[in-house]
Amino acid sequence: RKAHLLEGLRKALGKIDKVIQIIRASPDTRKAREALIKLLDLTKLQAQAILEMRLQRLTGLEREKIEKDYQLSVKKIEEMEEMLAHKEKLWATIKKELKEIKKKYGDKRRTKVERKEKELMFKPEDLIKKEEVVITATNKGYIKYTLLKAYRKQGRGGKGARGITVEKEDFVEDLLIANTHSTLLFFTNLGKVHWTRVYDIPQKKRSAKGRALVNFLSLGENERVTTTVAIDDFDATRSFLMVTRKGVVKKTLLSAYSRPQKGGIIGINLRKEDKLIKVLLVEENQDAVLSTKQGKA
């Protein structure tokens, strides 16, 4: 910019008498600027700089100073262009300037660089707010969670509120109260167990449908979830009681399921044509009652 303005002043100094005549004869600044642009082939910026120039700068001494400044500016521009065209020169200049800054403003380090004793490790749940939720899982494998506060106490005679939208012939299989940090265990008809965290399933509005479990679990062909359980603590005092279609039961300590594995694990080995139909979380001193479709227990 400086070289550009100085170039305009040099042109004006070459025809200074004509320039002064135009300035004096022009009725306003705009007319004078247009006349200078036409006479000297200037830019609008250069013409404005000439109009703002004081008359004392037109002396012989000032003329020499303008010419000298212009030549220095042109030389500086050439040096900059040369430096930008060659990376070696650019980095050498940067290094030189940084050393000068260090010499002028350098100070002893005020902070200490110490060996890292322990790497900070963050778990996903450290960044997720712990909130009470209602988890809804349907028979056809759709799941969601809704914040518990979205449900309110209903007075006597109320009509109720829609808790989920389900497809035709679908229904709610499991309704659980848990929190966003809880672990969900999914038991399938093929006897396998899968894991996920509550914060990994979608949060939806109270009346929303939810999302298919196949988006979160590695389910095989003809494999579907029959029971969903929410766990906060894998303690050794509780167990899972598994029941198959053919009446086989199995009890396994809850603590045996504390280590999730990708793809799930075998929870119970099933005989041919048998299916896992239900899993219950039980205490040691509880009794279990099985009922048949004929109404016997």
Image (tube, rainbow, N blue to C red):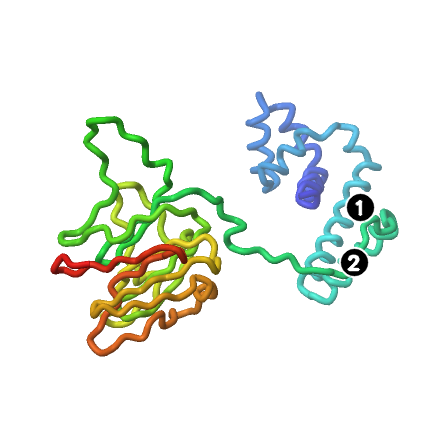
Residue 68: percent from left, percent from top: 80, 46
Q: Tell me if residue 282 comes above or below residue 272 in the rendering.
A: above
Q: Amino acid at mark 1?
A: Lys
Residue at which label 2 appears: 114
- Image point (78%, 32%), residue name: 57
Q: Amino acid at mark 2?
A: Glu
- Image point (43%, 48%), residue name: 180
Please tell me which of labels 2 and 1 falls first in the chain.
Answer: 1
Residue at which label 1 appears: 68
Q: Tell me if residue 174 comes above or below residue 66 in the rendering.
A: below
Crowd around label 1: few <14 · some 14–19 · many ≥20 (10 Å)? few
Residue 205 appears left or right of 132: left
Residue 18 visible to an observer of this rendering: no
In depth, the one of 120 and 104 nearer the eye is 120
Residue 24 appears left or right of 200: right
In depth, the one of 79 and 9 nearer the eye is 79
Element type at marker 2?
loop
Residue 269 appears left or right of 11: left
Q: Which mark is residue 199?
A: none
Q: CA distance from mark 2 to mark 1?
A: 55 Å
Nearer the viewer's eye, disc 2 or disc 1?
2
User: Which of the image's four quarters has the N terminus?
Assistant: top right
